[in-house]
Image (cartoon, grey):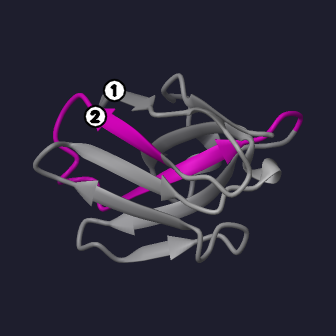
Amino acid sequence: QVQLVESGGGLVQPGGSMRLSCAASESIFSINTMGWYLQAPGKERELVATITVRGNTNYADSVKGRFTISRDNAKNTVYLQMNSLKPEDTAVYYCNKVTSTWRRFESWGQGTQVTVSS
């Protein structure tokens, strides 16, 4: 099973930017859709950005126009560029494959904490 390691989180002021990375232990080329998820304190995990192997992207309304997902299949890495960050973006961010059953996934990385605060 592919192991995923998220990195790049930290503390940023409102309006700032941050780039998250997700490194996979093996090729992600065969995974049609990869995604970034977030889990805010006291809330359920939600899917906020997806990208297919062909580069087609989709975003949750809450991040549309501010976040950009990308993938480098040669480096087995998925990225999330986050701009115009808001305090409500504060969460632990995870990457994983995306299927219709993602809510039942048992295998997740450790995630990376993003805190947006002045």
Chain part drawn in magenta: 19-42
Above or below for 9 versus 97: above
Q: Position of residue 53 (x, y in %)?
A: 25, 65
Q: Which mark is residue 3?
A: 1
Please give left or right for residue 116 compared with residue 33 in the image: right
Does the magenta segment cover residue 48?
Answer: no
Callout 1 secondary element: loop
Q: Position of residue 17 (x, y in %)?
A: 55, 52
Q: Taking the image as drawn, is residue 105 in sight? A: yes
Q: Taking the image as drawn, is residue 98 in sight? A: no
Q: Position of residue 87 (x, y in %)?
A: 81, 49
Amino acid identity at mark 1: Gln
Q: Which one is in front, 92 or 87?
A: 87
Q: Identify residue for label 2.
A: 24
The residue located at (73%, 68%) in the rendering is 62
The residue located at (81%, 51%) in the rendering is 88
Residue placed furthest toward the left: 74
Callout 2 secondary element: strand
